[in-house]
Amino acid sequence: MADSRKASLNTATVRKQWNLAQCIEGCARHGFAGIAPWRDVLAEMGVNDAARQIRDAGLRVSGLCRGGMFPAGDAAGRAAALDDNRRAVDEAVAIGAECLVLVVGGLPEGSRNLADARAQVCDGIAATLDYARQASMPLAIEPLHPMYAADRACVNTLSQALDLCDALGPGLGVAVDVYHVWWDPDLAVQIARAGAGRLLAFHLCDWLVPTRDLLLDRGMMGDGVIDLPLIRHHVEAAGFGGLYEVEIFSAGNWWTRDPDEVLNIIKERIEKSA
Amino acid sequence: MADSRKASLNTATVRKQWNLAQCIEGCARHGFAGIAPWRDVLAEMGVNDAARQIRDAGLRVSGLCRGGMFPAGDAAGRAAALDDNRRAVDEAVAIGAECLVLVVGGLPEGSRNLADARAQVCDGIAATLDYARQASMPLAIEPLHPMYAADRACVNTLSQALDLCDALGPGLGVAVDVYHVWWDPDLAVQIARAGAGRLLAFHLCDWLVPTRDLLLDRGMMGDGVIDLPLIRHHVEAAGFGGLYEVEIFSAGNWWTRDPDEVLNIIKERIEKSA
């Protein structure tokens, strides 16, 4: 139903099979419009080499994964996080990313203070935003599923992410990943509230029933229960015109397959199930 | 910090070790104020025998687990669910339960229509409420964590549950289980919104990091990251005066322990960590 020529490959989807150079080559060969690398594979390849090869392959970069992880137990940890986020902005600029995705972080080790972690996230984004604005790099807060509130991201709904956007102003938006938000009774309202200017990325995969692992059991589009065409409709009706970034963590299935098969299936499923 | 004399044992916490008769005897012996049986163990023992022994043991029944599971793929399935919910109301009355807990159900097999499932839930609760009001049995909607939206309950926030309460009127309230709601940025506001009249049950356990299984890896109070005293404070400040019902699904740990040890630790942890 959707146009597979707008596919972008989040490199995590084939992270066990391909390095970044192989991902770039594979995306180009399979007719993907874009790619979204993680910073670890970017570092492995070298930012400049990666930037050049992505550009030479004619690929857009739908986002760089990821900045964030702001909360820390002490001032040194918070400062280190801000340093790292500035480097992430620089890398996003270097590879021509359309946004830097922020997975904001959860509770510091030993803490149960969720309100404080959320306040630290707000402060961390504010500080990073100053730097990102000078570099003209949009920051995309990715609300993560509530099951990651403790250890990955304490921003868990689109509403909460947009409250941060409202508070902190221009240069900041959201990444809507269907896996994290599909359950939200307020989803359509919040996507409309975000609007074209703040919908910076759209990530696809599916929620499997049963889900056997909290992190590494995401499904391919069409294999789960998410009404992908409905969410895509909301996002596009709100004005989003960007790529369909496919990000599937799947230790037991997709990470064990031939990556050329995975990319073919991604294109088929974007057409058929998204 | 909390008063362990207000402990109630949800029988699921020792379901692998004790039958209902043993749970009743154990609760009385350990000085628990209440018990909350599941319907399967109630059926196994016989409702009338169970009701008599619970009464003779001087235990309150903080809730009957559970009614709900309303959505179905066809009219026959929906009618069967309503029948079953009426039986659950009868059983709750028979054992003197303070409420019938509703786990509302998720997507019917093969469906991706979350809005329709939610509409079915609203209809199902409305129908059951007519019956429950005649029996003077309060219904407690238990919003479940969003990770159960597909297969267990498509009511996933306290806000959503309270919207149903607002729409359907008297005789309906909520069961607040810390495991399901601890992450919610809107939690304090929604607990206050619920108020004493609609806070019908309060369930304790903890969220472990890491959580190794979506269903069967809940933690004992104090072993995880939930700020239990804070949530208890919100609930009690809103006027809740009921029992602390402890419900821990734990295949790898608590279900393998001596249940007398489990009940002792529950009391200790209510004092120390809740």
Image (cartoon, coloured by chain):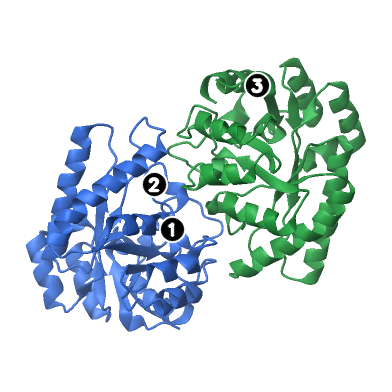
Chain colours: A green, B blue
Task: Name the quadrant of the N terminus of chain B.
Answer: bottom left
Q: Name the residue under label 2.
A: B154
The quadrant where residue B14 appears: bottom left
Q: Residues within 10 Å of mark 1 (few under 14, many from 20)?
A: many
Chain at tag 3 = A
Closer to the camera in the image, B154 or A251: B154
3D distance between C-alphas at marks 1 and 3 = 40 Å
Q: Residue at x 66, y 42 (%)?
A: A175
| SS at badge 2 | loop
Q: Which amino acid does label 3 sit on?
A: Leu
Answer above or below: position of B273 versus A31: below
Task: Say if mark 2 contacts mark 3, CB within 8 Å.
Answer: no
Q: Which of A261 and A169 is in front in this view?
A: A169
Q: Nearer the viewer, residue B262 or B48?
A: B48
Q: Report, in whole angstroms, how far the alpha carbon at label 2 lies from the one at label 3.
A: 32 Å
Camera-side mark, 2 or 1: 1
Asked which secondary structure carries label 3, the reply is helix
Residue B261 x %, y %: 35, 73
Question: Mark 1 = which residue?
Answer: B159
Task: Give the percent coordinates (x, y) of residue A216.
Answer: 57, 41
Query: Mark 2 Cα within 10 Å, few/some/many (few <14, many 20+)?
Result: many
Q: Does any portion of residue A204 appear in the rendered image?
A: no
The mark lying in front, picked from 2 and 3, is 2
Name the image quarter holding residue B243. bottom left
Left or right, A244 with respect to B191, comes to: right
When asked about the image quadrant of residue A238, the answer is top right
Is residue A33 found left or right of B42 in the rendered image? right
Horizontal and vertical percent position of residue A139 = 76, 47
Mark nearer the N terminus (2 vs 1): 2
Give the residue pinned by disc 3. Answer: A263
Q: Which amino acid does label 1 sit on?
A: Ser
SS of the residue at dot 1?
helix
